Image (cartoon, rainbow, N blue to C red):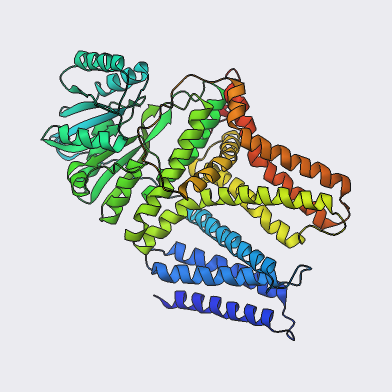
Amino acid sequence: MDRAANRTILLSGIIVVLNWYAVLSHDLTPDWPMLIGCSLVTGFLVLVFPANRHHHIPAGAVHLSALMAAAAAATSLHAAPLSWPVVGAPLGLGLAALALAVYAGVCLIATGMFMDWRDRQRSMRKPPLMPGGMAHQPFVSVHVPLHRAPMEHVRDTLESLAQLHWRHYEVLVIEQGGKPGEHAAIAELCARLGPRFRFLQAEHAEARGAALNRARKACDPETEIIAVVHAGTRVNPRMLHDLVSQFQAKGVGIVHAGLSFRDGGKSLFKAICEADYRSLLFAGMRRCDRADAIIHHAKLALVRRETLDRLGGWDEQAWLEDAALDLLAVEHGYEIVYLATPYGSTLLPERFADYRQQRFRWILGAIDLFRRHAATLTVGMRARLLGSLLPWMNDGLIVALSIAGILWSLALASFPEGLAPPPLALTALLMLPVLLKMARSMHHMRSRVEASFRQSLAATLADLAMTQVGAMALIASSRTCPSPGASPDVHGPAEKLERNLLLAGREILLMLLLILCITLLTLHAPMQDWRWVGWLVLLGLLCLPYGCMLLMAIAAGLPFLPASWVRNGIS
């Protein structure tokens, strides 16, 4: 560890000791503004400094300095002369813990924004041309897993694969379990497209990882590269020409390619989903290319067969088999490459229920992946993986704050003379989870994706709408996660508005309760007291995620709403 890191940790420790001494001493009257300012600045620096040189400083030093600075800030923020109980009271300890959690999240998110700003000018990797005028072409086995996908989507994918500019390849279509009539139609399509295409029928329903392992064992013995393309994806004819060239570097084990969405202009709901997915997929995969982040969601990937065999194949117990494979690859020293250029176009969910279910599956799978592999990871990889989960932990915090805010507001309305809102400083602290969620989404779209302002607003709306879904996934992950099973079909027909409103029932109920609390407190609150004004503003912010979910449900139930409300003005 270098001297600068030692000085940073030492400064954090001095501030911790000074803050605690100021709290425990009755005679000392500390300069609280100075202490709070020093703690906040130091907490930010001890995280930003390692972020700027994170490859040269041990992760343990980063974690220690961040924890000390966050503890210092939490202590100073809480121990300021407020009208609430002293630090030793149970309520005071709870507030100190809350300040610690929120401030640590602020520093981590600020660190991510700093890294994005620092790397904004960094160019993505460009696919090098293969030497010798494409003289050597390794044999590629393309695997297409299916689970009750519409026949027109299967046909689009297979016909696009038949047009690939590559001589040595095969296509294996793997059924994960479906109706007997579908099997005959798929087998007939494969026979019509030629001997390159083979259909592997499943005897029973199975997870995608199991289906891909079955294809891995059935592929041609000469296979050097395995590609995975999901149903509904139309691939670029140059996909293999450009992506396989990345494996010229011996350390590269996996290559991911970007995707576009060809039905984003169909309706307002799909336009919002497109903006949300651009933020998730493109921004997340750029982070993967830069810093080996693990959690992402891809539908177009290539992996070296030798690497796949050495890692034991696909994880059949994982909800996100592609992320699990990436995790093992990074752990074993392989490099993962992401190309930002879209080499295929895919489809967005048709139904509101499928959109919610897909997001729930992603979050639950990511948490389950961390829980099953955390013990075997290095400290640095564990920190990066945990950082990918922080936004969903923030979702759980927002829902918990909503429920607590409703209960406390009802108590304030029932006993206005005996109770009072929290101090304004604490209320402002409680606003941070919602504000940071909005800022993070806008920042991703504007700086990473370089989207238009309308698309940035749409992505922020979708991100806020999924708050309750993230919280429910956190609750589900606290129990033993079930077997993933076959992936659900996300291309079913659109549902009616009444069904969508029923699915968003929990969010609508929380929104109505918060509006009721705002109404009751407005009638009884002394508006000249800024504490009451701050509390009402907090309740209004907590309404936003549930209002966004209501808007998403309405947009999905009214497919005639134009996508131009979002897509016009795309940069």
The residue located at (32%, 18%) in the rendering is: 179
Residue 92 occupies quadrant: bottom right
The residue located at (38%, 62%) in the rendering is: 380
**Residue 154 drawn above or below residue 176:** above
Q: In which quarter of the image is the N terminus?
A: bottom left
Give percent across and percent down for residue 506: 62, 37
Q: Nearer the viewer, residue 13 or 51?
A: 13
The residue located at (84%, 54%) in the rendering is: 415
Give percent across and percent down for residue 406: 72, 47
Give percent across and percent down for residue 136: 13, 36
Left or right: where 334 falls relative to 90: left
**Residue 87 drawn above or below residue 253:** below
Residue 166 in view of the camera: no
Q: Nearer the viewer, residue 531 or 88?
A: 88
The residue located at (83%, 56%) in the rendering is: 530
Residue 323 in view of the camera: yes
